[in-house]
Amino acid sequence: MSRGFSGRVIDLTCEVYNGMPTYPGDPPFRHEFVLMGSREGEVTLSRLEAGSHSGTHVDAPLHFIPGGLSVDRIPPERLVLPVDFVDLSYKRPKEAITSRDLEGKVHAGRAAALYTGFSGLRGSEDYLHAWPYLSRDAADYLAGVGVGAVVTEAMSVSGWAGAKGYPWPPLVSEEDAAYVHVRLLSSGVIIVEGACNLGELAGCRDPLLVIAPLKVRGAEGAMARVLAIC
C-alpha cells in the first residue's frame, strides 16, 4: 500500500481452510504442507485441492452457458467497479429476494452487494442450504437495470434446488436455479458468491469493488479475493 493511500480497505473474502463448508456435492477444500521448514532459509511449501466454487468465488458465463466466457477471459476492467450496498438484513433464511426488495437501490454499471447477514451462519447446517436467494423477477430486474456485478453472502445467487444424498428439501426448482444464473450471466453480470463482511460496507461512501478471481485457463469459475475500497 502506498504512503499516500488514506482510504479503508474491507476484505469481503471468506477464509478457506480444511473442513470449511462447500456447496453440497462439490469437492472438499484441502490444504496440506509438502515441505515444512524448521529454520530460516528452509523452504515451506504446500498444495491445494479444491472445487473452483469453493469459498468466495466468481461464476463465469461458462458455468451455465455452453461456449460462454471462461473466468480467464473476463475483461479485467469489468472486475473493478463502484458498488451499491443493498441492506436486506430483514430477509430470513430460505426467503426469496424479489424485485421489490431491489427497486431504486441498484444502478447500471455498478455492483449490487446484497447484504443479508447470512455469512454469520457460516459453519452451521443452515449455511449449506437455507440462504436468502434471488427470485426470477429479481434476476430480471438486475439484468434489466444493467448492474455490473452481483455479490452475495450465499453459496449461490439462486435458491437451494436440492441435491442427491442430502436431506434438505429444495426451495426452488432446478429450472428456477438455472434461470437466475443464466439471466444474469447472459446479461454480462459478474456473479460473486460466498462473500463475507458485506455489512461493513454500510459505513462506506461510494466504495469501489475489486474482484480478483484466479486466472484459471478455460475454467467456469474460480476462487477470488474480493476487496472494497472506501
Image (cartoon, helix red, strand yellow):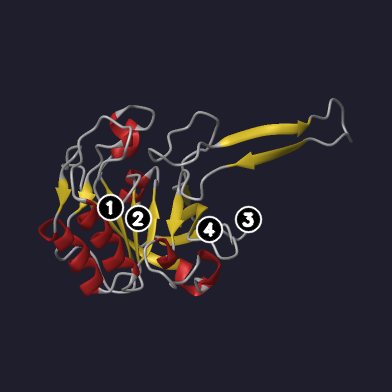
The reply to whether callout 4 and callout 2 are in contact (CB within 8 Å) is no
The residue at which mark 1 appears reads as 114
Give the CA distance from mark 3 to mark 4.
20 Å
The residue at which mark 4 appears reads as 213
Can you tell which quarter of the image residue 66 is in?
A: bottom left
What's the amino acid at mark 2?
Answer: Val
Q: Quadrant of the N terminus?
A: bottom right
| Total numbered labels | 4
Nearer to the camera, 142 or 156: 156
Report the residue at 51% width, 74% height from top.
Answer: 75
Q: Position of residue 59 (x, y in %)?
A: 42, 59
The residue at which mark 2 appears reads as 151
The residue at which mark 3 appears reads as 1
Between tags 3 and 1, which lies in front? Answer: 1
Report the residue at 48% width, 53% height from top.
Answer: 226
Report the residue at 26% width, 52% height from top.
Answer: 158
What's the amino acid at mark 1?
Answer: Leu
Element class at badge 4: strand
Residue 66 is left or right of residue 224, and the answer is left
